[in-house]
Image (cartoon, grey):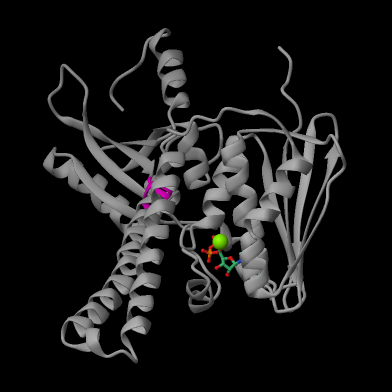
Amino acid sequence: MGFQLDQYSQPLLKAVLGSLREGILVVDSQLDVVLYNKAAVSIFNLPAVMTGPVRLIDVSRNKTIHQGFRQVLEENKPFDAELEVFGKQERTFSFRATPLVVPPSEEVAGAIGVFFDVTQLLRLERVRREFFSNLSHELRTPLTSILVYVETLLNGALYDTENNLKFLNIVNKHATRMQNLVRDIADLSAIEAGELKLNAVEVDLRAFIENLGVLIASDLEECQVAFHQDIPPELTVYADPQALEQILMNLIINAVKFNRPGGSVSVTAKPEGDNRTRITVRDTGIGIEEEHLTRIFERLYRVDKSRSQEVGGTGLGLAIVKHLVLSHNGDISVQSTPGEGSEFRIRLPRKAIEA
Ligand SMILES: Nc1ncnc2c1ncn2[C@@H]1O[C@H](COP(=O)(O)OP(=O)(O)O)[C@@H](O)[C@H]1O
Ligand SMILES: [Mg+2]
């Protein structure tokens, strides 16, 4: 390529290029690849050690790559493009080629191509966009209903003693749904932003769950579901009590609401290993089909939207649960048989680890 590296620059260059996450391909003016780095090896499936120049066409048949390098060589200007590529997994790269000019010559001796994998970035961007578009839909629906019923009341239905209370109840229901949604979003974004301060203490699980049982009494009655708990005495969980309540309440309320009349919910727990407590929330409800199992922890994901809305759900509960469990260094898993019921299992630390 018309220039040589001295004995110091060569290993330095190799080390620097080797440490980059971006794939680098250097071509000469004949479009032969004269240098590439480790990242490029895996992107283009190249031999790990370069034994001599390789033709660009043997590295990749991607038209944009060829066009980019050629344009840089001809016009002495950078070239940028997004590439949808290759191989087994579909990946997207941001590709930038720049002219390689080696002083003292002012001629373009070759071109440097940098391949930056943006697959993950684009995925996150898509998830974020979808979330906001779903969210505005979620807020708009109850708001529209509220406005329609309020308008109807204002237009005279206020004095229609047969319907006025019914309409107000509907307004109340939708407003409550909006309130729940706004509350869950605020929680979730605080958790995701890492703003949540967890003050973990050793919680006596049996008393804690007994207490929750009292809080859900009216839900149990409404859904005609029985509640059982079987927690060994003195079993503890090392967790922030407020977060623990949120985790368990979300799981238990789901187990109650996605149940059937005459069904039951049971919460059991036992110590596991050195310092873990395993809590299981089991129900005899509608269950969850395999294809939805991994997705129910995503924000706003619901198997049956109308059923969830009917029971005041927002689709954010399990996303919050998962985040909270993970921030306690715990984990969560689920098993389910459609038509028979589901089982959510969480593992949390048992005791404070002594320093
Ligand atoms: N115990 C359960 N049994 C059946 N389906 C469940 C259960 N828990 C959660 N799901 C499903 O997972 C979805 C997401 O749950 P969640 O995030 O708590 O949202 P929400 O309860 O607001 O609908 C629910 O809409 C429901 O389809
Ligand atoms: Mg829920």
Residue 141, x across and y down, in percent: 32, 74
> In the image, what residue occupies the spot 54% across and 30% down?
198
Q: Quadrant of residue 36?
A: top left
The number of numbered badges drawn on the structure is: 0
**Viewer can see residue 120:** yes
Identify the image quadrant of the C terminus. top right
Residue 231, x across and y down, in percent: 84, 46
Please tell me whether the stretch drawn in magenta is mainly helix, strand or loop. helix
Relative horizontal placement of residue 102, taking residue 21 as reference (left or right): left
Vertical comparison of 12 with 57: above or below: above
Residue 23, x across and y down, in percent: 41, 37
Q: Quadrant of residue 32?
A: top left
Give the magenta part as a residue range.
118-122
> In terms of image quarters, where does ligand 1 lie?
bottom right
- The one of 353 and 46 positioned closer to us in this rendering: 353
Residue 19, x across and y down, in percent: 46, 24
Q: Quadrant of residue 17?
A: top left
Vertical comparison of 285 with 297: above or below: below
Vertical comparison of 10 with 123: above or below: above
> In the image, what residue occupies the spot 40% across and 44% down?
189
